[in-house]
Amino acid sequence: MCKKLSLLAPRIMLLLLFFLLFIAYSLSPGFAAKYYSEQTNFTETSVPMTRYNWDKDDIKSCIYLDDGIENAYYVWTKLSVQKWRHALQEYTGNHLGWNITAKFVKSEAELESCDIKVYIYDKYSDFPDYPIQTGAYTSVGFEEGVGDNNSLDMRVYLSPLVLHGDGETEINLPPYAFRNSAVHEIGHVLGFGHMQMQKGYLMSPQFDFWQTNEQLPITTLELEALVKVYGIDGFD
């Protein structure tokens, strides 16, 4: 009996070693990542950051749907917010921080109590800054008389129908292109500017869905830039 146990012991130890290695790799950010990808395009190695940043770790987004807009656009926009939260939590290993949330509101008036106000309009011509703005954009301001970052007035404008850069062609965005716009605009909300390259990065100013048939992922490039600003403890 003792001889049999002594023969089994190395096998048991080997199996235990493989099990522990599997657990270690599974918990490492690069191996287990679901909400972000490794940076693969190194033409640019940093993301421009804006002058503002958040100093609270409970950022509330509210999403308003214009009349006639399908509920799917609300869902895709909410998932875009959640994607940034999960990516940051996963990348930093801090699953208690990075609390940016999103919920539906029935009226534009209800948006005013939210940190981030997201409008989804039927078409680009409904944007308050039309005709200057004919595609998704983010407007950033500060409450009058208040100078700290808690007073950020952050508004995101989205639409499934946008105007091409030629100023004439209307484009009904396919779902993946709308989702890319939503993730891109939430990136602006978090403090990103635009990349120098017109296309190819999540934060590039243009997304050519005729050439790219899926949305661009959040990558380690964007996440590392946010960690440099905030550290790993969250937005506060």
Image: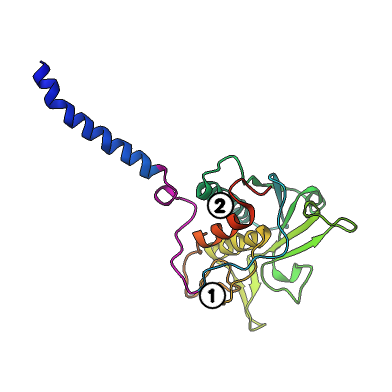
Residue 232 in the image, given as x and y percentages of width and height: 58, 48
Q: Residue at x 90, y 57 (%)?
A: 145
Residue furthest top in the image: 1
Residue situated in front as seen by the camera: 65 or 42: 42
Place of residue 188 in the rendered image (x, y in percent of width and height, measured from the top left): 66, 63
Residue name at image x 61 percent, y 52 percent: 81
Pick whichever, 48 or 76, lies toward us. 48
Q: Which residue lies under the disc numbered 1?
A: 199
The region drawn magenta spans 27-43
Mark 1 residue crowding within 10 angstroms, few (<14) / some (14–19) / many (20+): few
Asked which secondary structure carries label 2, the reply is helix
- Residue 118: which numbered mark, if any? none
Residue carrying label 2: 83
Q: Is residue 72 left or right of residue 30?
A: right
| Position in image of residue 43 (x %, y %) | 48, 74
Above or below 167: residue 201: above
Amino acid under disc 1:
Lys
Dominant secondary structure of the residues highlighted in magenta in the image: loop
